Amino acid sequence: MKNINLYFQHTLLYVVLLSATLVYAQKSIAIKGKIVASESMETLPYATVSFVDAANGDKVVNGGLTDEVGNFSIKVKSGKYKIIIDYIGFESSVIASKIYSESANIGNIQMESKSTELEGVDVVSQMAEMEIRLDKRIYNVSQSLVTKGGTVSDVLENVPSVSVDIDGNIELRGNTNVRILIDGKPSGLASVGGVEALSKLPAETIQKVEVITSPSARYQAEGSTGIINIVTTKQFLKGLNGVFSTSAGRNDSYGGTANINYKKGKFNFFTNSGYRDNTNLGGAYQKNTYVSNSLIDQFIEERSFDRRREGFNINFGTDINLGKKTSFSLIYTNTHRDGIDVTVNSQTQFLSDNTQIKSTRNEDEVDLDMNDQVSFNFEHKFNDAGHLLTVNLQKEWNEELETASLQSFDDTGNASEPFEKNITDDQQNRELAQIDYVYPIDENTQFEAGYRGNINNQVIDFEVLIEDASKNLIRNTDLSNTLNYSEEVHAFYSQFGKKYGDFSILAGLRLEDTRVGVYQLSGDYENGEKNYRDLFPTLNLGLVINPTTSVTLGYNRRITRPNSWFLNPFQSRSSRTSFFQGNPEVNPSYSNGVDIGYIKQFKKFTLNSSLYYRHSTESISRVAVTSGETVLVNGIETDVIKRFPVNLGTTNEYGVEFNSSIRAIRGMRTNLSVNFFKREENGTYEGVRYDTESVSWTGSLSNSYTFPYKIRSQISMRYRGPNKSSFGTSKGFLYSNLALSKDVLNEKATLNLRFNDLFNTIKYRYTTETDFVTIDGDYQRRKPTFTLTFTYRFRQEEARQSRRRTGGYDSGSDGGGFEF
């Protein structure tokens, strides 16, 4: 009987333990944490987090992606799991098997950047050149070898999906209606002028470039195609550290930069300054074939450019932490640049009787460009869950003074026309005030609201002086003018985000009130004011199919506002037989776009693809017509071509884009980007149909490889396909850049040699046809160059090793909050 009772007790105990185990196994818990980069401590959005049952053949039980601020919350059954974190450009991070019986926050998990291995020895670790995320792509251009010693314009020309058109305007997905920001804010350096304006800043001042093709309501509605955000370099390492670089290149081009920061306690002081003396050589060819001119068959112009830019940029500031939750920064930026442009225009007229008349037109231009900017940034964290208030204030002053001297000579070297001088004084003041508030309602719900005000006042004084018979310079009142342009945009936005398991939704609405004034202080043109108020809804959806696969759907309404150059009704002459003239009657263009994204992470590469469509109304396009004016060229009356913008009609754009980051073999990284698109433009101007349909594509391939002796290489190949618009047609071209890099002085310094446009193929070829003339031409903004750069670093390696010794797992931080 005693044995029976003992057996019964053991059996009962076994049943109780088994029942407890079953209950324990069925208990659902949530494991939270935050993924950060070990070198910069920046959060890593959309990293893959997998919970693996090691006892069951490393079976993935559950997983997901981190949100935009690197947080994750994964629900699993209580049990014993190994956690694996993957992120493009970083080594996989593994947390050893551990029993999780209750919900827990495991804090920060640090990930190490992938190192290129060579014969068992690690090369200095680097950030991935491209990071693919659900809402944007980030290009860590500080790691790019083919932009060392260049400018910001060189950086953008090497970013996939970004290109430059014949006029130097930045394009995204083949469209120039893109908004360019610097550190998330508008700047006079990026507002107008395209790559020419951005060439004021050295490439070494840029850390990364963010390409956002489906912006949410927190972003400005300006720019129908999307946003390019240029993020400048700023270090936060403890103590004194910095990077110095100096460069020299073809055509007597030199430069140097210094990035220094000192961090101690609550204070961080930094400077990012540089000097550059650069010369670019280029050229252009244009042939006008006249249809109805009885005297002239053709007029050919061949221009050569010699452009020198010398200047410096100074950026310094301080970050002050008032406590663990409050900080602010003060930043001052100054750029100063002198320029000299020498243009020689050789002209040939082919008369109807086969006679040829040759002449030369010289243009010497001197310009001075000065820019000052002051910024104040304030941030307060109410808690560690993402409850946040930020305030940004910015004031900017910019002045550009250009003086151009023009003189024409006949084939004997004698002056054929009076001497002419053009003086342009462009002064611009910009003000920005921005407030953003983020309130996480719970770990899966977030509300956000904010205000942004932009005020821009611009005065452009254009004076034309022409020499009279007595050699006196007389003001030409027909061509001289003064434009006063003002623009105010006040915007309010709110958006609401919610996560339902693997599904995320972010819905927003933005109100923008715009006031534009165009005032002519001279001339007979009427002054004009335009006020318009618009609503811009946005919707972003995301679905995590499994730990390595996600899809997104984005919708947004956006606006493209004409700038002062498009609205100024006075002529801007590039040659005697053609000119550009603004149109004050041009209205904004509105667009509605849909973007469907798909991201898939494989073992060796990540694929990010997008299918997009955008419909625009009141599209702003340029047309070319005969102006009705004629000029005497070598005594012969010649028609003048006029180019100007109009609201032509509607535009439909379709496209599919593929971006991938590949690590197929050890020591090699490959980034591939292809964009296929179709553009349909329909419209009528003065009874003439300008319907066009263009199918084209762009592509880029960047490959980095490490040779023996730790010599790093990078080759970049880009293709710009043919295009067709109301202005005419252009041909495609392919070009390549190459760079070699080697660490020296115990890896404290680096030598970098880059070659730009290896095979001299960056040439824009175009054709424009009207009822009176056919224009064929080509344009080369810059001939091939090469640059040698020496970079020296101090204290950075020591700081990096110190962080590595701390390990990759920090359990002392709370990673709350939610953001789509």
Image (tube, grey):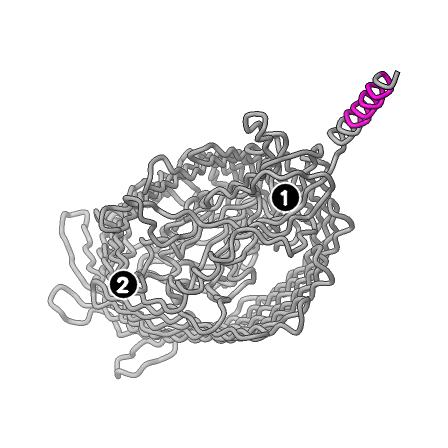
Amino acid found under the numbered disc labelled 1: Asn
Quarter of the image holding residue 402?
A: bottom left
Identity of the residue furthest to the left in this view: 412
Instruction: Say what secondary structure mark 2 lies in.
Output: strand
Q: Disc 2 designates what residue?
A: 789
Q: Is residue 799 above or below residue 775?
A: below
The reply to whether discs 2 and 1 touch (Cβ–Cβ < 8 Å) is: no
- Residue 19 or residue 146, whichever sits in front: 19
Local packing at callout 1 (Cα closer than 10 Å; few below 14, some 14-19, many 20+) is many
Instruction: Say what secondary structure mark 1 lies in.
Output: strand
Quarter of the image holding residue 800?
A: bottom left
- Residue 12 or residue 763, whichever sits in front: 12
Q: Is residue 718 above or below residue 178?
A: above
Residue at image position (46%, 44%) is: 91
Residue 650 visible within the image: no
Q: Disc 1 designates what residue?
A: 556
Main SS of the magenta segment? helix
Question: Which of pointers 2 and 1 lies earlier in the amino acid sequence?
Answer: 1
Q: Quadrant of the C terminus?
A: top right
Q: Is residue 226 above or below residue 245?
A: above
Judge whether residue 734 is colored magenta.
no
The span shown in magenta is: 4-19
